[in-house]
Amino acid sequence: MAEFFDQQVDLGRTPEQFARVWLHSHPGDSPVPSSIDEETFQRVFGRCDWAVMFVIGQGGKTYARLRFNVGPGGQVVLPVQIDYSTAFGPSDVDAWEKEYKANVHRSSWSWEPREALDTDQEMFGADLSETYDAEDWMAAFEDLEPEGRSAILQELASRPDLWHQAEEVMPW
């Protein structure tokens, strides 16, 4: 995408001449724009007469907002939905399914001891192979390197089934 933008700018075009809709996905279930999304939308599309930011979350939830900079200017959140029932011309569902199965694999993590304890140290910057109570767990979490904390938070964000069963998962 960055290369496309660079090519268009090199040709003397402005974003309103080649890009007004910014569609992207989020790895978690939430489609709510992040602060980086907001900064990018302002920086890249802020001078366009109008532009749309559309975000789809991993679970299919969507967010769309139209911003217009003409007249008094303003913005409005758009109600949207995705219709997956109709194939489009260039789609190749069989090839996509084959590539998906070959390259996307479910992974999981747990706090239970494993044979290769060095993996936790290498991946998270801390040994997480022990069983922790809530206070110990939080202390261990705080001791992690930022990348380790981020990996755990992303995993938790992708597991909304845990949010609705807090009394079963965390009985304290």
Image (cartoon, rainbow, N blue to C red):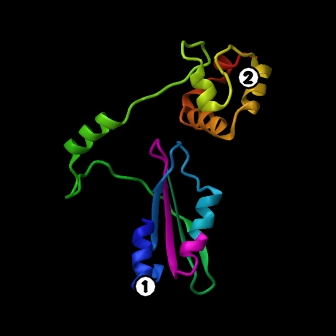
At horizontal 62% and vertical 23% (from top left) the residue drawn is 165
Percent coordinates x, y for residue 5 in the rendering: 44, 73
Residue 137 in the image: above or below residue 61 = above
* Residue 93, quarter of the rendered image: top left
Residue 152 in the image: above or below residue 136 = below
Residue 169 in the image: above or below residue 122 = above
Q: Is residue 102 left or right of residue 12?
A: left
Q: Quadrant of the C terminus?
A: top right
Report helix, strand or loop for mark 1: loop
In this orientation, which residue lies closer to the viewer: 133 or 143?
143
At horizontal 21% and vertical 57% (from top left) the residue drawn is 90
Q: Amino acid at mark 1?
A: Arg
At horizontal 54% and vertical 12% (from top left) the residue drawn is 115
Report helix, strand or loop for mark 2: helix
Which residue matches tag 2? 137
Q: Which mark is residue 13?
A: 1
Q: Amino acid at mark 2?
A: Trp
Q: Looking at the image, is mark 2 or mark 1 earlier in the sequence?
A: 1
Question: Does residue 52 belong to the magenta stretch?
Answer: yes
